[in-house]
Image: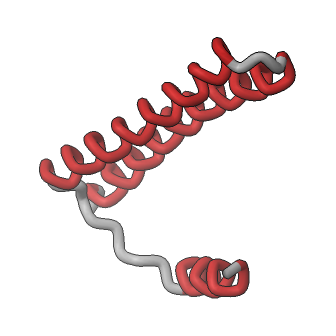
Amino acid sequence: MAVAAGAMLFKYRTNPPELRPWSRGRVVVSAVVGGAATVAVLGTLGWVAVFYPDWRMQLIAAVLMAFVVGFTIWVVRLARRMHLRALEP
């Protein structure tokens, strides 16, 4: 599986796809899917951080919650940057 992922990354890196502006439908679908996944992960990690009896797991869950929020912000900024770059002449 790692070899297949490496091959796909190599192909993507050597032949990047052309940038296209994001359509309204693509933005809506991405927001719904990404938002639902983010809420599900944060809910699960929040439950672990509050109710799980082991303090080490609570600490790891709290750190991962911060990571998920940061990752989500990074992905949104990356998508916006790609959209603006695709709009340039």
**On screen, 61 above or below 25?**
above
Work out whether residue 83 or residue 39 is closer to the camera in this orientation and state it. Answer: 39
Q: Residue at x 86, y 23 (%)?
A: 56
Q: Which residue reaches farthest left?
A: 24
Instruction: Classify residue 71 as left or right of residue 20.
Output: right
**On screen, 66 above or below 5?**
above
Q: Report the coloring of the rendering.
A: secondary structure
Residue 26 found in image quarter: bottom left
Instruction: Classify residue 74 as left or right of residue 21.
Output: right
Work out whether residue 72 or residue 32 is closer to the camera in this orientation and state it. Answer: 32
Q: Residue at x 23, y 55 (%)?
A: 22
Q: Residue at x 49, y 33 (%)?
A: 73
Q: Position of residue 41 (x, y in %)?
A: 51, 35
Residue 20 found in image quarter: bottom left
Instruction: Classify residue 75 as left or right of residue 83.
Output: right
**On screen, 9 above or below 43?**
below
Q: How many numbered badges does the structure rendering display?
A: 0
Q: Position of residue 7 (x, y in %)?
A: 64, 87
**On screen, 68 above or below 29?**
above
Q: Which residue reaches farthest top?
A: 50
Work out whether residue 55 or residue 1 is closer to the camera in this orientation and state it. Answer: 55
Q: Position of residue 37 (x, y in %)?
A: 41, 41
Q: Position of residue 1 (x, y in %)?
A: 67, 81
Q: Which residue reaches farthest right?
A: 56
Residue 51 found in image quarter: top right
Q: Residue at x 65, y 23 (%)?
A: 48
Q: Quadrant of the C terminus?
A: bottom left
